[in-house]
Image (cartoon, rainbow, N blue to C red):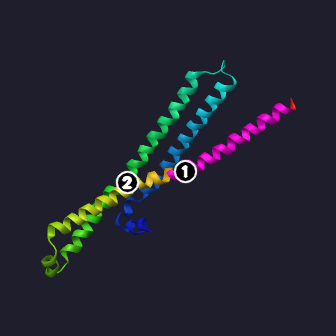
Amino acid sequence: MIYKKLKQYAPERLSCAYGGILMSLVSAVFMIISYYYIYHFFKQLITDSEKVDFTEAASKIVIYLVAGIITYFGAVFLTHVLAFRLETNLKKEGIRHIMNSSFSFFDKNESGRVRKIIDDNTVLTHMSVAHLIPDLSTAVFIPVLGIGLSFYVDWRLGLLFTAKSFS
């Protein structure tokens, strides 16, 4: 609901929020793929320790982890673009409202204190938009994809044990 209210202050950069969420999804996919290769590596190490190619397995794991980190930073970059525009527009709107205030308002409130309140709150809004959007997206995508991966691994193991029992 809060994000819905904030959309009106930076509608031209709203696509950055959606792009950040999408890049968080891609980052989560890369992370889950790296977890799969870690699982695959340990499975080979335990069952066929003589046939394990450590350099190939390690390179796949590192490549997917680095790809996940890079795409996550891309998501954070996009949400920062949105957050900086949002912060600027919120400050402008706050100053515009202050400029339209009556003189009795300034008799009761110091202008520096009011400006500090506006600055502090826009910085907090910036932080919540720039960091919470990709963090919360990743916090949702990783468990969902992890559960999907566990079902996939369980399905593959079921096929493996079924194939061995028939031979």
State yes or no: residue 32 in magenta: no
Task: Give the amino acid at mark 1.
Answer: Phe
Identify which residue, 110 or 74, lies in the foreground: 110
For marks 1 and 2, the one nearer the N-term is: 2
The quarter of the image holding the N terminus is: bottom left
Identify which residue, 28 or 150, lies in the foreground: 150
User: In the rendered view, does 74 fall on the left or right side of 49?
Assistant: left
Q: Position of residue 40 (x, y in %)?
A: 63, 32
Q: Residue at x 73, y 42 (%)?
A: 155
Q: Residue at x 82, y 33 (%)?
A: 163
Query: Residue at the front extreme?
Result: 46
Is 102 situated above or below 46? Answer: below
Distance between the Cα atoms at labels 1 and 2?
18 Å
Identify which residue, 154 or 64, lies in the foreground: 154
Q: Residue at x 48, y 53 (%)?
A: 21
Is 74 situated above or below 114? Answer: above
Task: Give the amino acid at mark 2.
Answer: Ala
Q: What number of labels is visible?
A: 2
Range of magenta residues: 139-165
For label 2, the SS is helix
Q: Position of residue 123 (x, y in %)?
A: 29, 58
Q: Residue at x 55, y 30 (%)?
A: 60
For label 1, the SS is helix
* Residue 128 lies in quadrant: bottom left
* Residue 82 lies in quadrant: bottom left
- The residue that mark 2 highlights is 130
Q: Position of residue 98 (x, y in %)?
A: 20, 73
State yes or no: residue 163 in magenta: yes
The quarter of the image holding the C terminus is: top right
User: In the rendered view, does 137 fall on the left or right side of 11?
Assistant: right
User: In the rendered view, does 54 fall on the left or right side of 78?
Assistant: right
- The residue that mark 1 highlights is 141
